[in-house]
Amino acid sequence: MHPSEYWLPALIFLVVGLGIYAWYRERRLRYKPYIKLKNIPANIDIYPTTAPKHAICLIGDTGNITDAVHDPVAKLLRNWLAENPHNGTLIFLGDNIYPVGLPPVGHKTRAIAEKRLKVQLDLVREYAGSVFFISGNHDWNKGRINGLEYVLRQEEYVTKYLNRPHCYLPSGGCPGPVVRHLSEEVMLIFINTQWWVQKGVRPIGLTFNCSTESEADFFHQLEELLLLYPQKQIIIAAHHPLYSNAMHGGKFTLKQHVFPLTAAHKKFYVPLPVAGSIYPVYRKLYGPEEDMSNPRYRRLRKKLLQIFQKHKNIVYAAGHDHNLQYFAIKNNHYLVSGSGSKTAFVQSGGRATFVHENKGFFVLDYFEANNIWLSAIEPPVGNTTDQYKVAFRKKINPN
């Protein structure tokens, strides 16, 4: 055999070998928490033993829970509420009902949709602290053209069931921003990121009782709020993340490249190497409306980051991707807390300080102005008496 004839077998052997290595590494590391140690100060502070003045729970994508008693996140949330009976604020970050929000009465999936929503509502119905809901793409009938009627139906159901008239924000499907002052030090801003990528009717202006008159007015109002309260700790609650190492950020597993049909059904293991990469590459470079690469999503993200980068100490909390992620970028903090009822692949490294493919949620604890802690809380592992596991914790004091 001529030496040149060895090139093709050698190349095939190299590609297969690299693929096996990548698969093995991905499989070995996938479910382990990743922490970028260089982003954690060497002089580790000690988490206080006293109760915080205010605690904020940020949890997203809870819409698949059907068992209030045995579900690990439901139990975890119940424990958190008990530990913070009066000083807490609970924010559901959207996708409150899978798969398509709350259908009309008489629809074949109405009963299961109500059951999933009631699990969450019953957890907080008697809670003395603050409770807020925002909407995600699934709550808007998965972004379909009639999504507005779905989200309005859900808002009415939630507010009446809880007897909390102003707990679903922004109300009426409006884009926001909506402000809630928790204390002299802490302020919440709610924005409706689904509005920007939604098909069909998108409420705006006085016709829909929205305070925002135009897209430009939305950004103007948001920036005015940040300028008006520079001394406050500001948490911005939304559904769509601005940074993500997961699917909506264009990150996919090797399996999704080689066996792309498993995206439709987990048992469709039909190998389609090379051809199978078309779908992941499409979602990375352009993508549907729910992906960060989509032009409408990309435009919103670019403008929000331009505004936030002029300020410091903002915490931007989102769901959407089904994992836990934390990014400390340019003096601000970006969270993905979307593993309330599902988990999905998240890639380690990049600009992330912490990622973990696991159920749970993030908590912000405010003790004093210079003593603020961010924690990733997860269900305990194995047979243990612990109420929760702290997968990640960091003091995020103002600069």
Image: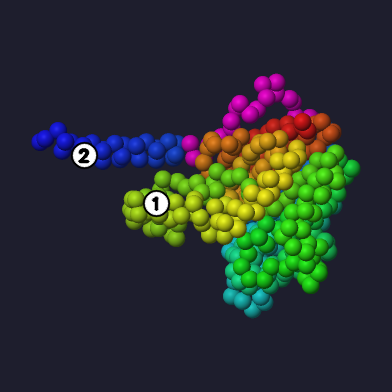
Q: What element carries label 2?
A: helix
Instruction: Tell me the distance, in whole angstroms, between the alpha carbons under discs 1 and 2.
Output: 22 Å
Q: Quadrant of residue 390?
A: top right
Instruction: Look at mark 1 in the image and give the residue it sits on.
Output: 277
Is 317 inside the magenta-drawn segment? Answer: no
Residue range in magenta is 29-49
Graded by Cα atoms within 10 Å as few (under 14), some (14 to 19) or many (20 or more), the crowding at tag 1 reads: some
Q: Name the residue under label 2.
A: 9
Q: Can residue 125 be seen in this view?
A: no
Residue lying furthest top in this view? 43
129 to 125, vertically: above or below: above
Residue 151 falls in image quadrant: bottom right
Q: What residue type is labelled 1?
A: Ser
Q: Earlier in the sequence, mark 1 or mark 2?
A: 2
Residue at image position (33%, 50%) is: 273
Q: Is the magenta stretch mostly helix, strand or loop?
A: loop
Q: What's the amino acid at mark 2?
A: Pro
- For the N terminus, the image quarter is top left
Q: Viewed as shown, does residue 25 lie left or right of 198?
A: left
Residue at position x 51%, y 49% in the image: 250
Query: Is 379 located above or below residue 288 in the figure?
Result: above
Would residue 307 be seen by someone viewing this image from the given angle?
yes
The crowding category of the residue bearing disc 2, from other C-alpha atoms within 10 Å (few below 14, some 14 to 19, many at least 20), is few
